Structures are given as C-alpha cells and as structure tokens.
Amino acid sequence: DLADVGQIERMAQRTVDEMGRIDILANIAGVNVHKPAEEMTEQDWDFVQDINLKALFFCCQAVGKIMLQQGSGRIINMSSAFGMAGFGGRTAYASSKAAVSNLTKTLALEWSSKGVQVNALAPGPVWTEARHELFSNPEFYANLIKKVPINRTAKPAEIVGPAIFLASEASSFVTGETLLVDGGFCAQ
C-alpha cells in the first residue's frame, strides 16, 4: 500500500532481507484524474499527488537509505512528457510529474557522490491496456497524435530500452536527468 509509509519501509527492508541488497529501484506507479482544472476537487488533487509524488519520494527515501549504506544503486523514477510540456485536462498529473523530474534532480545532487544515481523516464503517450478505452476514442486519439511528430503512440516495449539503459552500467555517467521517450511530443 503506497499510501502507508510504514509499509514502504517494510517492503524495502524485506527486499534486503530476502535478496541481500537492492541495486535498482523503478518507481513506476502512477495515477491520473482526467478533469479540467476548474472541476478538480481537493480529493482528486490529493489522490494524484499522494501516489505520483509522495509515495514515490518515500520509496526513494526507504530504498535510498539502503543504497547509500551499500555505496551504490540506481533509482529510476517515472515522470512524463506531460510534466515537461503540460497537457490540458491533466492538471494534477502534469504537476505531479513535473515535481518528479525536479525531485529526481535534487536527489541526484544529494546522493550521486555517494554512489546512488537517480534518473527519470518521461514517456509521451503510451498505448497500454489502461488507456485502451481512452485512446480508442477517434477524436481524442486524433487530437493527441497531432502533438506527436512520430504520428503515433508508443508501445510499452519502446519504454523498456531506455529503462534498461538507465538501470545499466551504460548510464554510469548519467544522473539527475529526465530522459524523454515521447516521439517528439516535447520538441514542439
């Protein structure tokens, strides 16, 4: 339960107890509320911020403490192209993902000299099961694709390569970065 900081801490400790160490943390949980800003309620706002930012921070903190003791580790946070460029109707989501990118930079400044690299991925629109109904709406999809120079959404597999890069030694001199994987969405 990502809303429970105690459970997050226990998850990190249980992982060390069972595996001996933690080398990689991928913070990929995320939620969204599709509403115009003027219709957003406090509950909507808190729901998105609590999962996308607060839980992510406390996962970083719990696992980061362990990685700092180890003297090594890689943290990959899931940001979003919508956090870099904004997107109407996604006020809470875009704000939370912009904060994730800045948090990533801040943690990298604090932890990289101690062996813990912190980076983020910022995918653009990705066609997943969770978005199938939304993306199947021809009007919505056509409006979305107009903003993506590659003229399509990403497949989940297209996010895997950049994630592997950030988790591997190939990224040993990369920290504090948010890697856009957005088909050019933010290039406009």
Image (cartoon, helix red, strand yellow):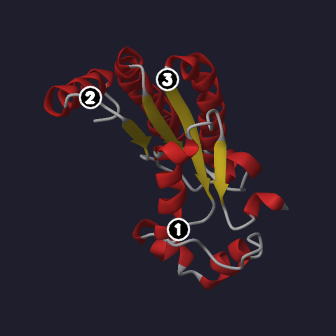
- Give the left or right position of residue 102, taking residue 135 as reference: right
- Give the left or right position of residue 41, taking residue 167 as reference: right
The C terminus lies in quadrant: bottom right
Q: Can residue 41 be seen in this view?
A: no
Mark 3 surroundings: few (<14), some (14-19) or many (≥20) residues within 10 A: some
Disc with the residue nearer the chain's start (3 vs 1): 3
Q: Position of residue 64 (x, y in %)?
A: 42, 23
Disc with the residue nearer the chain's start (2 vs 1): 2
Q: What residue did someone put label 3 on? A: 115
Q: Which residue lies furthest to the bottom in this view?
A: 138
User: Dot 2 lies on which element?
Assistant: loop
Mark 3 vs 2: CB contact within 8 A = no
Q: What residue type is labelled 1?
A: Glu
User: Is 91 placed above or below 101 here?
Assistant: below
User: Is 53 placed above or below 166 here?
Assistant: above
The N terminus lies in quadrant: top left
Q: What residue did someone put label 1 on? A: 158
Number of the front mark, 3 or 1? 3
User: Dot 3 lies on which element?
Assistant: loop
User: Dot 1 lies on which element?
Assistant: helix
Q: Is residue 38 visible?
A: yes
Image quarter for residue 88? bottom right
Q: What residue did someone put label 2 on? A: 21
Identify which residue is drawn at 45% across, 69% down: 128
Identify which residue is drawn at 64% across, 49% down: 179
Number of the front mark, 2 or 1? 2
Image quarter for residue 142? bottom right
User: Is 85 placed above or below 19 here?
Assistant: below
Q: Position of residue 56 (x, y in %)?
A: 45, 33
- Disc 3 versus disc 1: distance between alpha carbons? 28 Å
User: Is 109 placed above or below 135 here?
Assistant: above
